[in-house]
Each structure stands twice: as C-alpha cells, then as structure tokens.
Amino acid sequence: MYYLHHYICEKGSDMVLKTAVAKVIFYGYACVHNYENVEFVTNSPTRHETVIDTQSLNLPVRSSYHTILKNGDGYDFIFRNREYSLKGSTCLYNSESNRIINVLEDMYHLNHNFCVIESHDGDYYGIGGMHSRYFLDFCNRHNLKIEKEPLIRYRNAEIVSPKVHSKYHHNGLYLMRSADMLHWEYVQPLPVISGIHPGHTDNFLGYSKFDSKISCFYSNMLQQYILFIRANMGEGRRWVQTTRSKDLVQWEPFELLKMEGVDFDNDNYYHFDAMEYPGTDLFVGLSAYTNRPRYPTKICIKLMFSKDGVHWVDSGSILDTPMSTDGYRNSVQTTSVFFDKGDYYDMFFNENYDGIASSTKSSTVVNYKIPKDRLVGISSQGLGRFEFEIGVQSDRLILNYACQDNGYIKLTINDCETFILHGDTLNKELAIDKKYMNRNVQIKVEMEESVLYSVQT
C-alpha cells in the first residue's frame, strides 16, 4: 500500500512491526489525541454543471443507480432508465461524446441496480439484479417471458411456480463480464449472492429484493473486493450492509455497518457509495440521508469514514438537499464518490430523484467540485490544541489549511522543531529535518481561528 510506511522497532527483546500513516485526514476524534477546544468541520462541494439531462437525451423519465467510471478527460455513466420501455433498460452514456447506448435492454433482472467494476485484467465486471413478487407480476401483466432466466430462491422459501424444482427462485445478484461495457455474458448461470445468503438483512415483505444502488470495488487495503448494498430494516427504514470476496463469486456473510448513534427506527441511509480515500488508510462513503422515514426534518448527503469498511464515523452533512415531492425521501441520490482532478475532486449527484421537478419528472446528474483534501478539517475559533501521529517518508510536510486574518497554526515535531503558519494554502510545503525520515513522529498543534484539513509527507 503506497500510502503506508512500515518499520521495525525494538520493545525489550521483541521485534514489533508498526504501521505509520503518511497522510492524515482530520475526520474525527479517532485520528487525534490530547485535544482541547477543537471541533470537526465538513465542507460542501460547489455545484458546477449538468452532466446528464434526461430530457435533452430524450429519456422520458428519471434515470438512477449510476456507476461512474473515469474515461480519458470524460466519464462513462452506467445507469438505469426505469421507463425507457416497458422492460426498462440499463444504459451507457459518455460525457465527451454525449452518446447514449442501451446495453442491457432485455435483461430484466439486471435493470435495477447494475454496478460496473473495473478489473485488473482489462475487462469489466458487472454485478446486479432485483427480483420480487412485484417483478413477476409485472412480467405477467406485460407478457414478458422469463423462463430462460437463472433461478434462485426467496429467503423465506416461498414457492412462486409449481414448475420450479430447483432450490433456487428468482432473486439475487448476478455476475457478468464484458470487454467493452457493451456486450455482456454471465460468469455463471446462478446468482453469486442469493436471497438466502448468510447474514443478509431484508426485513421487509418477507423476501430479499436487492433493490438499491450497489457500490462494489477492489480494495487495495483489504486485498479483496468489497460490496455495499441497502439493508431493509423495516418499512421505510434503510441502512447499509457489506460483504467481501476475493473472486467476485464466493462472498463472505453480510455484516451490517456499525456506526455510533444510528437510530434504526428513524435514520435512513439510502443509496450508499464508497471508495478508498486517495493516499490514506481510510474508506470514504456518501449516503443520502433523512432523519425519519416520512416527512423528515433533516435531509442531506452524509459523509462517512471507516478504517475497515464495517465500522464507520459519521462526519455530518457534506451537502444539504431538498426532499422529494411526496415527502417520502431525499430527492438527491448519490451517484459516485470522488475523482481526482489535481487540485480538486469531481463528485456527482443524481438530482430530482423521485420527482422533485414534478412538472417534468426529469432526473439529472450534476457535477460538483470540492478542493482536494478539504472535505473535512479540525477547527478552533479560540485557542485549541491537539496531537497526532504521522509516518515521515520525505524531508517535507505538505499541509492544507486556512487561517483567518488573526489566526495561526503552530506545529511542533517531536517537541523539537516548530513552524508557525498563516494564510490560506492548499499545498504548503515545509522542509523538515532529515532525521525524521522513516520514522513515526508526534506533531503537537496549537491553533486559533483556523482550520487544518490534512497533513502528508
């Protein structure tokens, strides 16, 4: 892992391996110690431009459940268009060519939440699927044939057809492979995750729907794939569950995400998306949030951080958002986390989800931008102090901070070397003594009327 430094030190007669983080993001109290009179702040991105306008592309209604992949100077968007036809369609759109292609028009069970994953071998993998009795009723009403589809089982073993002799029925997550994202084939005929997968939580309607946005990627930190999907805790009550795999076929039991302060009867975390935060040992996640199932008083996009993908820290709202017109949920859906664009990150949000623009029922994907590594910071209006540890890999510290006119930040390394900072700087370089190289160091911070966002070496 390129952002970690490993070294050996002696403790008595034992040799102890320690790991030092070479980039510190101030996302919560777990990353600092000996703190007083400081608080954590979360910034908001700036709305930049519309990337996908479903009306201008002649898509009659809303698009949703986006996977976004970087492609040259532009982006590929893979998303569901719910009512492109009676059958629905999973579409591919490129922001540079402004071209849209229907890639999974006839695969009904993949049209709800198809997530595309870039592989190490140059191919793409897609994972997705949704089935329920409502899906079967829909197919019957519109004379859509489903006999050739793979079969899997409802978690309550409900029999939906006397002709089915397999232990499997019709819901689960299927795995597909493609060389170009246009032509897909099944990796195996049965789902890789079924409705009776160990640990899977879906306490609504008595069966597993798999009916929400999937976030799945290869984690360099874990050295395996990690997948996040909605956990239905009850009617109108949503949370997130996760599982892992080394090959995208065999998956570990699901676990519910763990986070202090979550009220499972009211808090709704919806359309969760995650990635490894660049240059750190952290996962970062975004989730559309409401503070109760109906008629919420708090609607926003939550920013969350994790060391292991299971235990998370809620860093608060990164973007306040409107409520859907029916008062049921957040009208903005998360569509991606962050793409590195030099001094800033690109972010994308699916706006007007669930018809906030009720006159057109249009849904758009909008580009937001935020200065690099300024998502969160540690702040003090009065005189504040704290300490943190960092693994030094060079003779430079690179700091991202903002001081008010009368503010300052003082850093002291190992009680030896001291620096005082003023102004507002994205990448301030400080030359430090080479004796700190390949070592963990303790940095004491004193600050007033300032925010420190990140420190790296």
Image: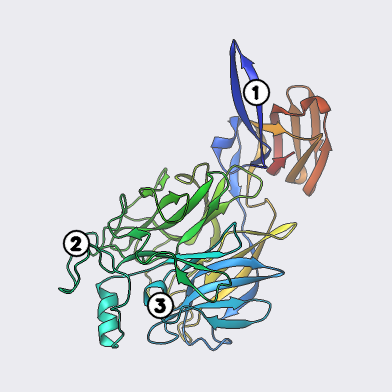
Q: Is residue 65 left or right of residue 454?
A: left
Q: Nearer the viewer, residue 393 or 332?
A: 393
The x and y percentages for residue 138 are 29, 81
Picture quadrant of residue 3: top right
Going from N to C along the chain, the mark reached first, 2 or 3, is 3
Pointer 2 local density, CA inside 10 Å: few below 14, some 14–19, many at least 20:
some
* Image quarter in which the N terminus is found: top right
> How many circles with numbers are drawn on the protein?
3
Going from N to C along the chain, the mark reached first, 2 or 1, is 1
* Image quarter in which the C terminus is found: top right
Q: Are marks 3 and 1 in contact (CB under 8 Å)?
A: no
Going from N to C along the chain, the mark reached first, 3 or 1, is 1
Which numbered circle lies on residue 271? none
Q: In the rendered image, which residue does mark 1 sit on?
A: 8
Q: Amino acid at mark 1?
A: Ile
In the image, is residue 365 above or below residue 346?
below
Q: Is residue 207 left or right of residue 56?
A: left
Which numbered circle lies on residue 157? 2
Q: Is residue 228 left or right of residue 75?
A: left
Secondary structure under badge 1? strand
Picture quadrant of residue 340: bottom right
Secondary structure under badge 2? loop
The x and y percentages for residue 184 are 49, 73
In the image, is residue 97 above or below residue 189?
below
Distance of label 3 from label 1 (alpha carbons) = 54 Å
Distance of label 2 from label 1 (alpha carbons) = 54 Å
Q: Residue at x 74, y 22 (%)?
A: 415
Q: In the rendered image, which residue does mark 3 sit on?
A: 107
